[in-house]
Amino acid sequence: MVVKICMGSSCHLKGSYKVVQKLKELQKELPELQLVGSLCFGNCMNGINIEIDGEIFSDIKAENVVETVKNYIKKRDEVNG
Ligand code: FES
């Protein structure tokens, strides 16, 4: 599973590094998690933006990123049975 985190200046100012810290902690629990930095997603107004396996998630914060990734996994696993 690949999570791309926007490293553009707007998302950076909103605290994308804190989101990265949270995701690094989550990696200990979920070794399948790969973190990749990305240039601006072109959606700064709704940042912080991340992309999980090609799906964009907006309004991400340190407070909701772990929940967002876990919800994504739950939905993915439901769909795939
Ligand atoms: S800086 Fe993140 S979408 Fe533009």
Image (tube, grey):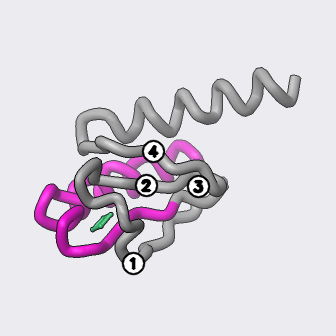
Proximity of marks 4 and 1: CB atoms separated by less than 8 Å: no
Ligand 1 located in image quadrant: bottom left
Residue at numbered disc 1: 39
**Nearest the eye: 81 or 28:** 81
Q: Which mark is residue 33?
A: 3
Q: Check disc 4: other Cα within 10 Å, few if <14, some if 14-19, many if 20+.
A: some
Magenta residues (range): 4-30
User: Which element carries disc 2, helix, strand or loop?
Assistant: strand
Residue at numbered disc 4: 57
Quadrant of the snapshot with the C terminus: top right
The quarter of the picture where residue 49 lies is bottom left
Q: Check disc 1: other Cα within 10 Å, few if <14, some if 14-19, many if 20+.
A: few
Q: Horizontal placement of 78 versus 66: left or right?
A: right
Q: CA distance from mark 4 to mark 3?
A: 16 Å
Ranked by sequence position, the earlier of labels 2 and 3 is 3
The residue sitting at 31% across, 72% down in the picture is 7
The residue sitting at 31% across, 44% down in the picture is 60
Q: Horizontal placement of 35 versus 33: left or right?
A: left
- Magenta-span inclusion, residue 19: yes
Q: Residue furthest right?
A: 81
| Residue 31 shows up from this direction | no
Q: CA distance from mark 1 to mark 3?
A: 19 Å
* Identity, as a three-letter code, of the amino acid under mark 2: Ile
Ranked by sequence position, the earlier of labels 2 and 1 is 1
Provide the major secondary structure of the magenta segment: helix
* Identity, as a three-letter code, of the amino acid under mark 1: Leu
